[in-house]
Image (cartoon, grey):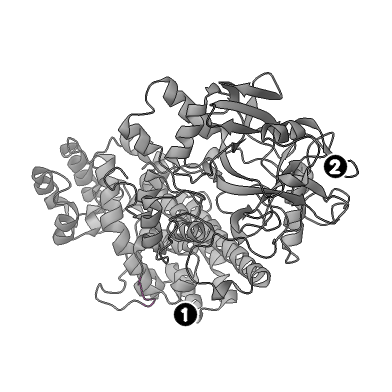
Amino acid sequence: MDYGSDVAAPSADDLFEMLGYREDPAGPGTGAVEATPLDIPWTDAISARAREFIVRWETGGRAFYEQVIKARPVWPEFASGITIGCGYDLGYHTADEFRADWEGRIPGAAIERLAPVIGFRTDEPNRPAKVVQAKALVRALSDITVPWEVALRQFDDGKMPKLVSQLFRSLDHLDRLHPHARGALLSLVFNRGSGGFSSSRDRFREMREIARLMSSGRRQDIERIPGLLREMTRIWGDTSSLSRRRREEAELFEAGLAEERLTEGVAALRHEAQPEAAARPMAEQHEDVPEQSDTEDLREELPLTEAAGPGVADVRWNPNDDDHPDYRHLSRHAPGESFDLLPEDLEALIRFNAFLTRPGLLVFALRGARIAGADKREDVRALTLVDQRPDHRDYRCVIGVLDREARRIWAYRASTVPEAKALVTGFQKAKQGVFEGNMLPTGCYTYTVGIHRAGTSGEIRGVLRLATTSTGASEVIALRSIDDVTYDRRDFWHRCAPADNIHPGRRREGFSSLGCLTLPGDYDRQSRTHSGLWADFRVALGMGRTFAASDDGRQFSTVVLTGADAALVARLRQGGELERPEIARLLMRLRFGSTGPAVARLQEQLGLEPDPQRLIGPVTRAALIALQQRRLGWADGILSPEMEAELGLRIFDQGGE
């Protein structure tokens, strides 16, 4: 895996300064008992973001490794030794450590040639002579190379576990820190050693103070640690790469504190909203719940609260596909691609996602797509679409109907995301302990015809309710952005019954939605008539433009995916690759509404009670999200073969099931 970052990677000079300026004061012995018990794998101890941070600072990234140092031994100057792989300084290892770490990874001849430089580093005394020797050694060893994959594997399997153990032997109460914060301190240990936490030397006074604050375990003490990381810059000066690393470590630690505060606030909100949750068994839930959790849609009569914080102008769709849960699992393709969607493509998406669908007409919703040259296409064999992204302001999605028997498609301009105003009110109300505004994640859901906002001035009869009954509300996992107004994979995943129905948008410009799926059109309560594309959609489902009580209770499976999902499958089908076994396996996904033996294996490996339906509902998706957050520091609620490997699960590779 290549590790990227939004933050600029260190330059060659920065990296050599970093590698060359190692500090390794004596720390706890290898047999010491951990100050904090390390009872989890090291991969769970720090977040993926922290891991990427450390790899970036220790290696410069794959491009630097392969193009600048060309995978060869280097001497980073200062007081370092000859360094190979991902910052593996032979000057700071014993011969036994070196052989244990590298035998079987690089040729035996290379090990023998590197063995004489074990323990050699260009420190005092006689540093000038050692510098001359180091330069000669690098020239003599320049034909030895360590491929990036080998270097990174040794880093993960050899160096990371040792340094994590050193950290946990050195500091108390690490279990009280967010994985981002633990990663920041691990980065410090990589660079300065763990002995600084107990050293009496003045240059380690900030590290001693960090150890003292961690020993108290109090939040107010822990929150002082980023300041101490920044104070260390006194040692090297503001312009040094080591000072830059300390400042970035402080920012990473603060990100952990911020996420902890958000998590605590969310936990309090969840407890208030779902006091019965703790009593629920760890078994899947497929039935409607008595009451929905959210205030229903169509609140346009209420003005936004005058409050500090982001406004409607600040709302935006996340510009980075890699940071959005709907798109993270997909290969990277810029929006704008035009493609023909066939019934076979929709069937392939259902098959690859193992969706359990009801017989009869199927509703599909493509988040981030438009119909080429029209607002609707009806009763067609092929549908030309353009992949795009939503914006929370306009109808930039497609909702349609697939007649699976006749293999015909009806499609309409629509929205599958909340309006911009909903993100602002959601942000404001979360501070008051109220949930309002969410986005329904991709998956397969059951919708039942019923009433929207029954008994109010905004009542609409004949909508599709997110429910298995005409008056109920299904429990799902909704995504809420409660600390800003842009959705991303680090947002709050809420197990709730949000009543994200499908209904008319009811506005001449834009649409009204706190999380519902909408189509342009309206409903006249007195005549009980529907209008616009919304009415056309109802007709495609076999209902009239005027509400009929006989429609209540009709049910439809609704597959919610993205235009990018559809474009990928259409592209592969057109190239004749869709049925190739290796391609089909790469397209496999498990998410809300998936069913079958793979789901049963997932539920078993997540520690859930057996589910007779073998169907992913809110409990399984919540457990998957929790595992992703523990291991990665973020979640998308989607299991792909790549994600399976990252989480250490064995779900898909079971004899083709």
Classify residue 133 as left or right of residue 327: left
Relative height, residue 375 to residue 436 (above, below):
above
Badge 2 local density, few (<14 within 10 Å), some, or many (20+)?
some
> Can residue 331 be seen by looking at this rendering?
no
Q: CA distance from mark 1 to mark 2?
A: 68 Å
- The amino acid at mark 1 is Ser
Number of numbered discs on residues: 2
Q: Nearer the viewer, mark 1 or mark 2?
A: 2
Q: Main secondary structure of the magenta part?
A: loop
Residue 215: give its label. Answer: 1
Q: Secondary structure at mark 2?
A: loop
Does the magenta segment cover residue 391?
no
Q: Quadrant of the C terminus?
A: top left
**Front-lying residue, 505 or 361:** 361
Where is residue 181? Give x, y as percent: 49, 63
Where is residue 238? Give x, y as percent: 53, 52
Residue 528: give its label. Answer: 2
Q: Secondary structure at mark 1?
A: helix
- Choose top left, top right, bottom left or bottom right for residue 317: top right
Relative height, residue 120 to residue 28 (above, below):
above
Q: Quadrant of the N terminus?
A: top left
